[in-house]
Image (tube, coloured by chain):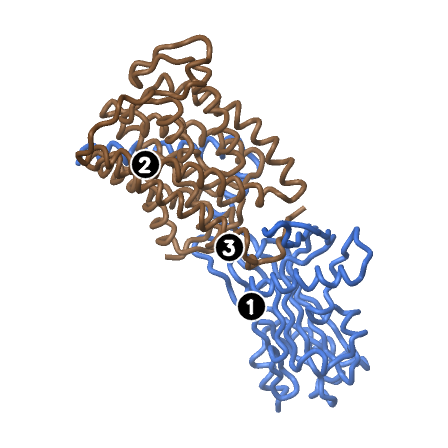
Chain colours: A brown, B blue
């Protein structure tokens, strides 16, 4: 099925794009990550110009998170309070990220910075998650339960002005989720991803939110931050390809529903271990990619 | 005899031009070029196309040309200013290092000839008429160093060649009966829209005897045109549309699955 993409200026096989959407949709439903970190590089690999890939992937992630948010909210899995705070932080962060992006782009180092960020972040997060989830799996497998763990990071407890977040079972300062949202917002603009793979572990291990609302709340945040990202791209780079986004959406909204169902019936520790393995795999692949000679030494930038 | 078969097979334009040139009785030979399509429509399902560039070369009196001619056709897309970046290995990783600006890099450039260019003309002539990828005039700006310029030019040509945007075919033109020539040039789906020029050169004994130009317009139509225009002109609405579309599709899918 040949489809011509009017903004990317290129004909692609529509079925391949839909399949890609299903894959990322399943991931987003299961793990609460947007899947942008997979879509964007795969689209670029397929020949779509990088800015079009990042912009259209943001649009797709919006759709995938809507259906994910609905699926999770039906089972009380979204903390709208924390979600709202992180969204505000995310929009502030996105503005800061946009400025940083154009500064790096003008000196031609944006790709390298993005790749190094990917390797560092994914590597760290993957390692922490893998260790934690393996420990949790051992624990439930009959080993004597450890003493109750500290719920959230000590730095979070030291912040002033505490609010009560009922669904997450927390009594912490809203500055913590606000700062987290800002960091994710900056990364969203820089890396062209929803930031779920940072948000989920940070909500679990830094904020100490209860595990059953983490995925839904992360998706809620991603939903609004990617909406802002789509608008930013539409206004600045003009690289949002609705035909491409539509095809990706078609696949990912279905995939997200499947993913949400899988998530309900699986052990959360197991899911976290799987996500950790996936994240580590991508980090290793990207670290390797930085060192080997790239396929293209030259890149064309239109002026 | 060959004149009669030619007239029967050729389009009306050719006939008219032929008559005109036959009457005016110039000393120069006559070159009548034609393109299979003057407009290429980019709409849904466009996967690239093939242009047929054909025509005839005749002696001034309309008879078969006496000399043996070589034909070179050059199809050139709209030129654009670009920045070309070059990656280098630094501290173990590949990063963008040097860059060079080109003021007029053609977005598409295809050369087809009846024999390899270097057998037809010398380098000087090839450079004057831009015959061949080695003789592209890209107007680099900034760096003066010719070695560096050459390295970057070669990089750009190599990159675009692999993307099928730059092509060179030393056997791409066939001449039949010393009169009719034809050449097929493939345009991939990722060509840019705009005005393309097809230039035909008749070359004899290393000299360009005649040249003629035809134009081809590549443009988007229908939905593709609408999308591309709206993205540029009303970007706020376009962005809102994209966001609404994604929210709506996600919501509908959510509702549908809730029923299952």
Q: From the viewer's perspective, tell me whether residue B231 is left or right of residue B96.
A: left
Residue identified by numbered label 3: B42
Q: From the viewer's perspective, tell me whether residue B90 is left or right of residue A61.
A: right
Q: Position of residue A257 (x, y in %)?
A: 26, 37
| Chain assignment, label 3 | B
Q: Position of residue A230 (x, y in %)?
A: 48, 34
SS at mark 1? strand
Residue identified by numbered label 2: A31
Residue identified by numbered label 1: B51
Mark 1–mark 2 Cα distance, whole angstroms, equals 50 Å
- Quarter that holds the C terminus of chain B: top left
Q: Is residue A20 visible?
A: yes
| Chain assignment, label 1 | B
Q: Position of residue A169 (x, y in %)?
A: 30, 16
Residues at discs 1 and 2 both on one chain: no
Which label is found at residue B162? none
| Chain assignment, label 2 | A
Mark 3–mark 2 Cα distance, whole angstroms, equals 40 Å
For the point 59% across and 75% down, the residue is B183
Give the quadrant of residue B57: bottom right
Of the image marks 3 and 1, the number of the one nearer the N terminus: 3
Mark 3–mark 1 Cα distance, whole angstroms, equals 14 Å
Residues at discs 3 and 2 both on one chain: no
> Mark 2 packing: few (<14 Cα in 10 Å), some, or many (20+)?
many
For the point 59% across and 51% down, the residue is B93
> Mark 1 packing: few (<14 Cα in 10 Å), some, or many (20+)?
some
| Disc 1 versus disc 2: nearer the observer | 2
For the point 69% across and 71% down, the residue is B132
Name above or below for residue A188 compared with residue A115: above
- Quarter that holds the N terminus of chain B: bottom right
Residue in the foreground of this view, choosing between A47 and B186: A47
């Amino acid at each position: 099925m040949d489809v011509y993409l009017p903004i990317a200026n290129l004909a692609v096989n529509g079925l391949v794009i839909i399949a890609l959407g299903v894959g990322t949709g399943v991931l987003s439903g299961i793990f609460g990550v947007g899947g942008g970190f997979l879509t964007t590089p795969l689209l670029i690999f397929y020949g779509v110009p990088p800015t079009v890939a990042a912009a259209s992937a943001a649009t797709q992630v919006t759709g995938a998170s809507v259906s994910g948010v609905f699926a999770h909210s039906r089972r009380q899995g979204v903390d709208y309070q924390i979600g709202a705070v992180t969204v505000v932080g995310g929009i502030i962060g996105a503005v800061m990220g946009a400025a940083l992006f154009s500064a790096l782009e003008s000196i031609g180092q944006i790709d390298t910075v993005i790749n190094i960020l990917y390797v560092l972040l994914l590597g760290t997060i993957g390692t922490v998650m893998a260790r934690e989830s393996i420990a949790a799996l051992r624990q439930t497998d009959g080993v004597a339960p450890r003493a109750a763990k500290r719920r959230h990071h000590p730095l979070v407890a030291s912040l002033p002005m505490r609010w009560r977040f009922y669904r997450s079972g927390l009594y912490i300062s809203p500055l913590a989720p606000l700062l987290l949202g800002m960091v994710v917002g900056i990364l969203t603009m820089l890396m062209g991803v929803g930031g779920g793979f940072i948000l989920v572990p940070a909500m679990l291990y830094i904020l100490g939110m209860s595990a059953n609302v983490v995925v839904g709340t992360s998706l809620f945040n991603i939903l609004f931050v990617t909406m802002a990202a789509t608008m930013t791209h539409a206004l600045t780079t003009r690289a949002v390809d609705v035909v491409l986004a539509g095809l990706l959406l078609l696949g990912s909204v279905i995939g997200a529903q499947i993913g949400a169902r899988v998530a309900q019936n699986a052990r959360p520790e197991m899911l976290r271990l799987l996500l950790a393995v996936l994240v580590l795999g991508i980090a290793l692949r990207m670290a390797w990619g930085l060192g080997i000679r790239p396929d293209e030494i030259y890149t064309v930038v239109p002026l | 005899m060959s004149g009669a078969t030619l007239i029967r097979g050729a389009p009306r334009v050719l006939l008219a031009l032929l008559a005109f040139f036959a009457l005016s009785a110039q000393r120069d030979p006559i070159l009548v070029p034609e393109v299979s399509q003057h407009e290429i429509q980019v709409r849904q399902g466009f996967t690239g196309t093939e242009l047929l560039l054909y025509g005839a070369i005749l002696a001034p009196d309309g008879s078969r040309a006496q000399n043996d001619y070589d034909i070179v056709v050059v199809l050139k897309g709209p030129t654009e200013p670009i920045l070309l970046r070059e990656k280098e290995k630094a501290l173990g990783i590949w990063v963008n290092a040097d860059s060079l600006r080109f003021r007029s890099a053609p977005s598409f450039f295809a050369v087809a000839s009846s024999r390899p260019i270097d057998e037809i003309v010398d380098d000087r002539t090839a450079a004057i008429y831009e015959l061949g990828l080695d003789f592209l005039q890209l107007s680099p700006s900034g760096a003066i160093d010719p070695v560096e310029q050459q390295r970057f030019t070669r990089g750009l040509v190599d990159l675009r060649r692999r993307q099928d945007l730059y092509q060179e075919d030393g056997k791409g033109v066939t001449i039949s009966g010393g009169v009719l020539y034809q050449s097929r040039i493939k345009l991939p789906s990722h060509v840019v829209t705009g005005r393309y020029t097809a230039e035909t050169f008749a070359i004899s004994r290393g000299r360009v005897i005649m040249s003629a130009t035809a134009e081809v317009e590549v443009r988007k139509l229908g939905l593709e045109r609408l999308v591309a225009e709206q993205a540029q002109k009303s970007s706020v609405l376009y962005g809102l549309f994209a966001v609404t579309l994604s929210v709506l599709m996600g919501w509908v899918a959510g509702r549908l699955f809730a029923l299952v």
